[in-house]
Image (cartoon, rainbow, N blue to C red):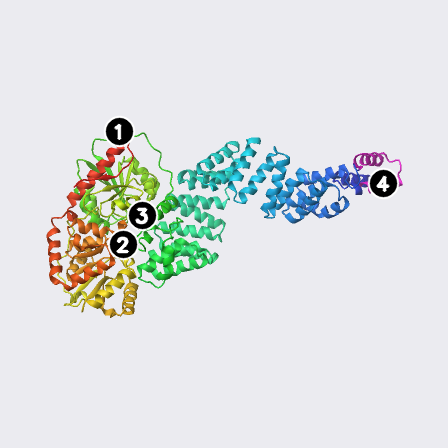
Amino acid sequence: MTQSVDKTLRDAAALHKAGRIAEAVKLYQAVLTKFPKNPRALNALAQLKAVSAPARPGQMPLAEFNALKERYQKGNFLDLANQAQGLANAFPKDKALLNLLGSVFNQLNQAQAAITLLSGALRLDKFFIDARFNLGIAHQKNQDLENAIACFQKVVELAPNNSAAHFKLANAFRASSKFEKAILHYKKTLALEPNHAPAHCNLGLSLQASGEIAQAIRQYQAALEIDPKFVPAQGNLGTAMMAQGAFESAINAFLKTLKLQPGNYITFLNLGRAYKENGDFQAAFDAFSKVISMQPDFSEAHNDLGLTLYGQGKLENALKSYQKAVDLNPNYADAHNNMGVAHQELGAVTRAIESYQKAIAINPNHLVAYGQKMFQQASLCDWSALQQDRAMIATLGVNTPDVTPWNMLGFEDHPMRHLQRSKLFAEKKYNRQPLAETARPAPRAKPVRIGYFSADFHDHATMYLMAGVFEKHSKSDFEIYAYSYGPNTNDCMRKRLTAAVDKFHNVRQLSDFDIAALARDHEIDIAVDLKGYTQNTRLGIFAFKAAPIQISYIGYPGSLGAPFIDYIIADPVVIPRAYESAYAEKIIFLPHSYQANDDMRPIANTVYSRSQLGLPEDAFVLCCFNNSYKITPREFDIWMRVLSQIEGSVLWLLEANKWVSQNLRSAAQARGIDPSRLIFAPKLAHDEHLARHSCADLFIDTFNVNAHTTASDALWAGLPLVTKAGKGFAARVAASLLTAIGLPELIVETEAAYEALILDLARSPQQLQAVTKKLAQNRRTSPLFDAALLTNHLETGYRAAYQRWAEQKPPAHIRVGP
């Protein structure tokens, strides 16, 4: 019997310790029934009665309540939850118990049960701060931010120094995107509790969401000073550094985060993005591959891996990654858009358009895809959706930074909207933290170091224009560096370049940051970008500030809208005074045409007959070798009216792709013109292409984007050109060239005058012959094809820009004299 009593007493003591008071009392009483004088049972029962008497009816005995609290503190939430209903029914007037039980359900994320219990506590005492605070937590867990905010506001009203309530209130405001109010209460939290690392971190998030990146970074750093192992602050510091364009610092932050939390796949994703933006594609590839090994079905990682492979030029592999992303998430609009870009680069234009259309179907506001779709359809001369898309043109890229400015040049001639597109695009795409400024060097007497940056230092239109400049630069006054990030070729144009410049650097494998740093190491004084927003640009080099003076030239016919570009090279024709405000850069005005031209450009000795080229021997041949995206229904309607009025005339166009001939012939037929009167020229080697110009009678230009190199090709080959001068740079290039070669009579201002002049020249052989003869005379004597003169003027502009910098003056318009 003794053993049985001992066991009963031990069981009773265990129940007592666990807070199961009623059960313990029953066991002690059972012992006393048989052994009324058992001292252990008497003492234990007396102790229980002393501490468990309720303070008032309906309230749980204190010992039982304290035992519940102890179990709560140990995390026994499921056990407590199982008892909750019975306890609440037993003690419905115990506000502290209801608050505790409500907190249990908060811990289990069972918000509705928590709300019921905590609301009951507040019905007993509406000033019960702990219950109001916990009710706010429950509402927030229930996604009811409005009621959560109301609860926390009531708490801070009753207890203004309650830092936890200010913190929770700030979190609720941040979750509601009310960042100004969130910032206020995070600051109040920190005034009460300066070493509250999460408050510093979340204040940083709110500041970052408000666009205050630098202040956000300071808050993340403050959190890390308090707790160097606080993972959220370290990760957020990385994302803020990325937002600021400080990719090296972002990478360091993410690497530190991974030391603290090696299995965090989101941090690996962000690390990969930082590497990718910094141009380190191999490191980005490794990071995204790591994410995929950890989370094989994470569609974003497959998309980012595709972008990295695209950056490495591995287009087929990029497509496979994008396909995997859309297989995992068929509604992933960005991945469909990226598939379109890869298809486009591979020449599968119709597939590209299909991918863009899928992205738009998923997200009708996917403006990147919309702009790409429109441009690719224009490149096919597919105008089927143009009327429907026309309503988008005026706003596309003007209010959001999602549209590549280049894609919109062909759709409208509106310099101010083009500027706005460029500004927004540059702000989003090229937000970089420039390399640290070193001590300002003393201006060098000479030579000034000029760095030219391009992907086109090979057999390319840029070199057809610029080769003569590289060869004519003054060796005594300038030291010329060329930085090539394009194909590593050994063609004749590359050989001319490397022979002409002082230093040639193939930097294709380097990141933008490293190229800018290399230029800094070389002490480049003036960095000249020859790409702008055209294909294969790496304008990020300039965002990192490769040189103290940075200039846009020849590649992009318009403003880059970027704060890191100081000057654009132009002339008074391409940028009249009335439109100077449409350019973010200061302008270096050359006295004649801005366009450089190689006056050693070879024309093949081949003497083509018209029949060899598929042209009628006795026809009047109108010619336009412009890229197909430049052709719009406006020009085409005029061309068809001209064909209808000039008997036997034909239109000779460049066969840019197989769809152009089909679409334009169909468009001609729809306008009553025999499709066979449109003849398409295949692409030829450049010297042969120049030679075949002799079989045309008149080059007719496009409007929104004129012929550029194509125009100077025609003039160099002796073919007269008619153009309509527009408003923007791209729409005035041919006018600049014709002015410089002394043929202003071929420039008109209206579409009606354009049509009339073409008809006059077609109907008057003598007038056309006179113009052709004048062109032949001026070709060798005018400024347009005088590379040495152009280079001299260009150098004068460079010297003036350098002198202003040396005198610590800001950039200003520079007008170079003739």
First in sequence: mark 1 or mark 4?
Answer: 4
Residue tagged by mark 1?
A: 442
Residue tagged by mark 3?
A: 537
Q: In the displayed structure, does residue 647 sit left or right of residue 358?
A: left
First in sequence: mark 2 or mark 1?
Answer: 1
The quarter of the displayed image where residue 272 is located: top left
The quarter of the displayed image where residue 151 is located: top right
State the CA–CA distance, disc 2 to disc 1.
43 Å
Residue 656, percent from left and from top: 27, 60
Residue tagged by mark 2?
A: 705
Prevailing secondary structure class for the magenta stretch in the rendered image: helix
First in sequence: mark 2 or mark 3?
Answer: 3
Can residue 459 be seen by looking at this rendering?
Answer: no
Disc 1 crowd, CA 10 A, few/some/many (<14, 14-19, 20+): few
Q: Residue at x 45, y 44 (%)?
A: 270
Is disc 3 placed on a helix, strand or loop? Answer: loop
State the CA–CA distance, disc 2 to disc 3.
19 Å
Q: In the displayed structure, does residue 90 sit left or right of residue 795?
A: right
The verdict on residue 50 being magenta is: yes
Magenta extent: 24-53
Q: Amino acid at mark 1?
A: Ala
State the CA–CA distance, disc 2 to disc 4.
101 Å
The verdict on residue 616 being magenta is: no
First in sequence: mark 1 or mark 3?
Answer: 1
